[in-house]
Amino acid sequence: MLTLNNLSPNKGARKAKKRVGRGPGSGLGKTAGRGHKGARSRSGYTAKPGFEGGQMPLHRRLPKRGFTNIFKTTYKIISLSDLDTFEDGTTVDRQALLDAGLVTERDTMIKILANGEISKKVQVEVDKVSRGAQEKIIAAGGTVKE
């Protein structure tokens, strides 16, 4: 019967740790598998990330394409369903969105998209509003000011 006191792993499931530097009989004595000279044989050696032993590293072998436009404007996207959490008659501007936790200080531009529905009358004052979102806000009785 198999009980906790006679459990053992399957044959070959456990392998003994390689003990290096324990004499010539082990096959890994003297230099402990590190070879004779060079950086890898010394203690404290660490290769830089991406270093391939002197071979041209992959990140330098691959072609570079395109560019990054540093003047690109990125918008923080807010859905109409997020605006539905505000009370009737509220002015939804950058500060109101910050207080609600929908945007952060780092978000430079804010855009509202027509994802979801809105049932509250809110005055929206943000950088951009999509046409669909603008129509839904006005249909609910709100106003839009960009």
Image (tube, rainbow, N blue to C red):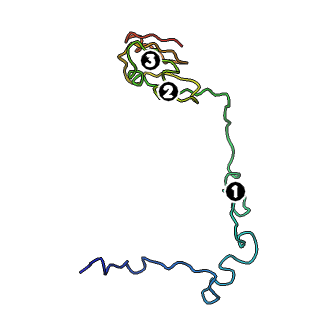
Which SS class for mark 3?
helix
Q: Position of residue 75 (x, y in %)?
A: 55, 26
- At 71% from the left and 73% from the top, the residue drawn is 41
Residue at numbered disc 3: 133
- Residues at badges 2 and 1 in contact (C-beta under 8 Å)? no
Mark 2, Cα crowd under 10 Å, few <14 / some 14-19 / many 20+, is: some
Q: Is residue 143 left or right of residue 68?
A: left
The first of marks 2 and 1 along the sequence is 1
Cβ–Cβ under 8 Å for marks 1 and 3 = no
Residue to which mark 2 is pinned: 77
Q: CA distance from mark 2 to mark 1?
A: 39 Å
Q: Which picture quadrant has residue 53?
A: bottom right
From the viewer's perspective, is 61 left or right of 141?
Answer: right
- In the rendered image, the quadrant that contains the N terminus is bottom left
- Picture coordinates of residue 98, whole percent (x, y): 50, 25
Type of residue at label 3? Ala
